[in-house]
Amino acid sequence: MSKSEIGLIGLGTMGAMLSLNIAEKGFPIAVFNRTTAVTRNFHEDAGDLADMITPTESLEDLVAAIAKPRAIILMVPAGAPVDQQIEALRPLLDEDDLIIDAGNANFHDTNRRGAEAEDQGVPFLGIGVSGGSEGARHGPSIMGGGTKSSWDRVEHILKAISAKYEGQPCATWMGKGGSGHFVKTVHNGIEYADMQMIAEVYGVMRDGMGMSAKECAAVFKKWNEGPLQSYLIEISGEVAAAEDPKTGKAMLDIILDRAGQKGTGRWTAIEAQHLGSAITVIEAAVAARNMSAVLDERRKGQNVFGAAPQKLHGEITIDDLEQALIGGKIVCYAQGFDLLYAADAHFEWNLPLPEVAEVWREGCIIRSSMLNDMASALRAHPEENLMFSPYFAGLLKQSDGALRKVASTAITHGLPVPALGAAVAYFDIMRTERSTANMIQAQRDFFGEHGFERVDDDQPDHHGPWVG
Ligand code: 6PG
């Protein structure tokens, strides 16, 4: 049998779907899974694509099945399994054979693996792949990190299998080291925030306005025809409309309100703190997932204080909610790109921020029509907070009133809106020259003599009269 053009290890859902996508785009692929039965079943179920797929039952066979210089994708769980797989594979490869980690790796690990590979003189790529199993099968968004020469070797395959926006492949090299996995991490942080704000608006409709899941579904479906058009709004309409096959009730009403998290959103919040970047909407979304997990504690709280939500009586309209989501989304993405900007300055990756927005336009979980406008704004105003670009400043001026009204009314009616509330506070702080941090400086100088600057001179280190 002729040699395969690429190899893949790890036939879990994402690995299997990616392999079928690669085969379907005409690239012969050799595959391996630690459990041989999985490999055999995958090949048997591959149908017409089976001829493009070479199943192998050992790493040696996998390596032998791939044309040189080889490229092998790892789709194994992030963390130690990736290191273990590299350790097992590298001795079987030639020096110019490329290993590509396409899992949800922590970018610090990818930075390390890239540096180790460079020390050994061998190629390595870490690529963020977004879009879930559907995306992996029919077109993910791909964010590449590593040496450009390594990316260039497989770019033709990655662009071929990626999602397309108006014919443009949603696959781009972001920079060296862990840059690709960092961009994916920020994608996931924004994903958490998008999902949280949708859940908050759903909560206002359900608990404040007494709307049924089906009524909420109709609202999401309508919003998906306007400025909020996006995959997450689309699927929110789908899940709200779904019925539980077991009871016939609205599926949403049967699902327990305890959110899981594999941790990528948490990584985003951690890195933002290290970089001094304020991503308060994303942080609120991560915290909201943490609070959803302590269900027993929340039950106790309800027994002590009574449930928070109170009914609304027309104080908020559906249009207010749509505008609030638009405003919250802009603030959230402005924070996400600010974090990318801060990381770029720190790690010197030279991230192409407009192309990050372009890569997210299709295939990934946060794909939306607004990302095209964000790419244009980032291109026109590369050094500026996205909120200040003329287009988004205009949208924010239109939506600010509704965002503020929804957040404040929800708060006075016990309807939790941590992410939307964080968006209002960030917006207000970032457009106010005179903040209240002078009080912080005075306190710090009082108890720690940490010094402060004055408004009437440019000396760096003054102390108050409280310092003896
Ligand atoms: C994607 C998704 C994916 C993510 C899962 C679960 O871009 O395809 O972001 O990578 O890991 O959706 O994420 P959580 O368990 O953290 O919600």
Image (cartoon, helix red, strand yellow):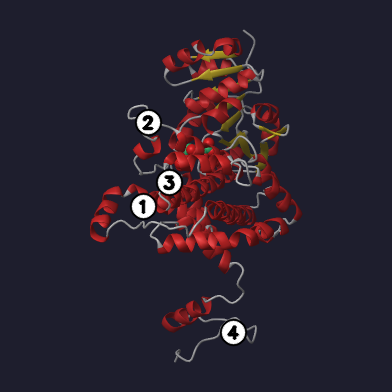
Whether label 4 touches label 3, CB < 8 Å: no
Which is more N-terminal, label 2 or label 3? Answer: 3
Which is more N-terminal, label 3 or label 4? Answer: 3
Looking at the rendered structure, the secondary structure element under dot 3 is: loop
Image position of 78 (left or right of 7):
left
Marks 4, 3: nearer the viewer: 3
Q: Which residue is mark 2?
A: 244
Tag of residue 291 = 1
| Quadrant where the image shows the C terminus | bottom left
Relative image position of residue 434 (x, y in whole percent): 59, 77
Which residue sits at x=48%, y=82%?
Answer: 442
Vertical order, 84 against 261 (above or below): above
Relative image position of residue 294 (x, y in whole percent): 31, 50
Looking at the rendered structure, the secondary structure element under dot 4 is: loop
Vertical order, 165 against 385 (above or below): above
Marks 3, 2: nearer the viewer: 3
Marks 4, 2: nearer the viewer: 2
The residue most toward the front is 313
Gap in Å between the C-alphas at discs 3 and 2? 18 Å
Residue 220, visible in the rendered structure: yes
Which residue sits at x=62%, y=68%?
Answer: 431
* 202 and 188: which is toward the camera: 202
Which is more N-terminal, label 4 or label 1? Answer: 1
Looking at the rendered structure, the secondary structure element under dot 2 is: loop
Q: Note whether ligand 1 is within 8 Å of mark 4.
A: no
Q: Which residue is mark 3?
A: 211
Name which residue type carries label 1. Answer: Met
Which residue sits at x=37%, y=27%?
Answer: 245
Which residue sits at x=66%, y=20%?
Answer: 25
Q: Which residue is mark 4?
A: 454
Which is more N-terminal, label 1 or label 2? Answer: 2
* 183 and 152: which is toward the camera: 183
